[in-house]
Amino acid sequence: MATQEEFAGQLLTTFNHAALAMMVSIGHRTSLFDTMSQMAPATIAEIAQRANLQSRYVQEWLGAMVTSGVIEVDPATDRYSLPAAHAASLTRAAGPDNMASLAQYFAELGGVESDVVECFRNGGGVPYEKYPRFHDIMAESSAKFVAGALESDVLPLIPELREHLQRGIRAVDVGCGRGLTMIRLAERFPNSRFEGVDFSQEAIRYAHSQAHLKGLTNVTFHAQDATAPLEADAYDWITSFDAIHDQGQPLEVLQNICRALKPDGVYLMQEIRGSSHHHGDIGHPLGTLLYAISCMHCMTVSLAQGGEGLGAMWGEERTRDYLTRAGFRSIERHELAHDIQNYWYVVRK
């Protein structure tokens, strides 16, 4: 056990890291990391000009980056540089290895802290409308971990799937958000028909617009609650990506999916990696972060719907229980090398 002094020191480190997370989010959103990764050592003014940002703000941001050890400065020339080893985890060019995008959660969730504190005292939940950028952040995450890894990692989870998609099947994504994955699949497999459902009208409007811009006629999107009945025994493939735990009535959603799946169909469910017990998540590489996101978003938006408040960390044991109660009989759990955050379940009737 740590002494009082040691624990206080750990807290100081935590507070510095929390501040760094906010600054990393700004570096990602302003593309400062991307900009600096393409520059030789440069002055504050040169960095600000290249990034088309205000110099005074870049100066203060660089102070946080230098004192945290993310960015280096040469005291003799006052020139700043982003080491290549750091850029490999902070830039969009890093693809799935870009960890800077995760930092966006802190500012987004911090904006509802007072609302969540009120829920601690009086119950209830915080509705989706309180999170103005959440769909942006989730779409970026989907681009990295799902849409960006379809050919290399996701489709091979179901050996026969690629051939069936080429021949032509019917698929639906439940909780599709902005529809990026279904759009990517519709482009790749023109003989198949794809649908997406999500209760966010804003997200569905965005998905419609993107499909229209690409001239796709084999993908459609619908704004509806995930418990709204889907056509029975109609779909060869159903997906949900980090969506079930947010639902007000997750068991009803899974039962709806089971009814809609053809007898020989496959349900692919991506859900947060974890145990159904706190002690089982000790040592989880993202445990504290994921419980915090669950408390500040996943659990509370479900409760705001009068729902169950399942939470992101419902865990494998509870996931298997819910799938079995929903009517599924075959449940395979997979892990993907590029994705330390999620489990991938291949489920059949």
Image: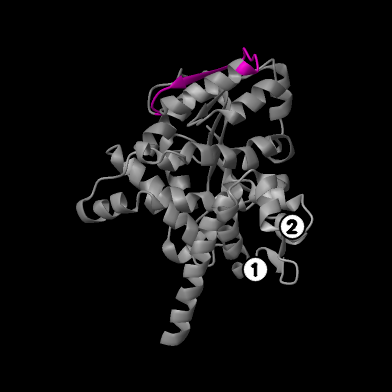
Query: Of helix, strand and loop, which one carries label 2?
Result: loop
Residue at 47% x, 53% y is: 106
> 60 left or right of 159?
left
The kind of residue tagged 1 is: Gly
- Element type at mark 1: loop
Disc 2 marks a residue whose amino acid type is Ala
Q: Please report the bounds of the magenta region as a residue range.
A: 213-226
Q: Which residue is mark 1?
A: 69
Left or right of 3 in this view: 341? right
Q: In this rendering, would 253 be left or right of 37?
A: left
**Residue 73, percent from left and from top:** 70, 67
**Mark 1 surroundings within 10 Å by alpha-carbon count, few (fewer than 14), some (14 through 19), many (20 or more):** few
| Residue at 56 percent of width and 60 percent of height | 60
Residue 9: in sight, yes or no?
Answer: yes
Q: Which residue is mark 2?
A: 42
Residue at x 44%, y 52% (from the top left corner): 293
Q: Nearer the viewer, residue 76 or 108?
A: 76
Q: Nearer the viewer, residue 325 or 30?
A: 30
Residue 225 position within the rendered picture, expressed as x and y whole percent measured from the top left: 38, 27
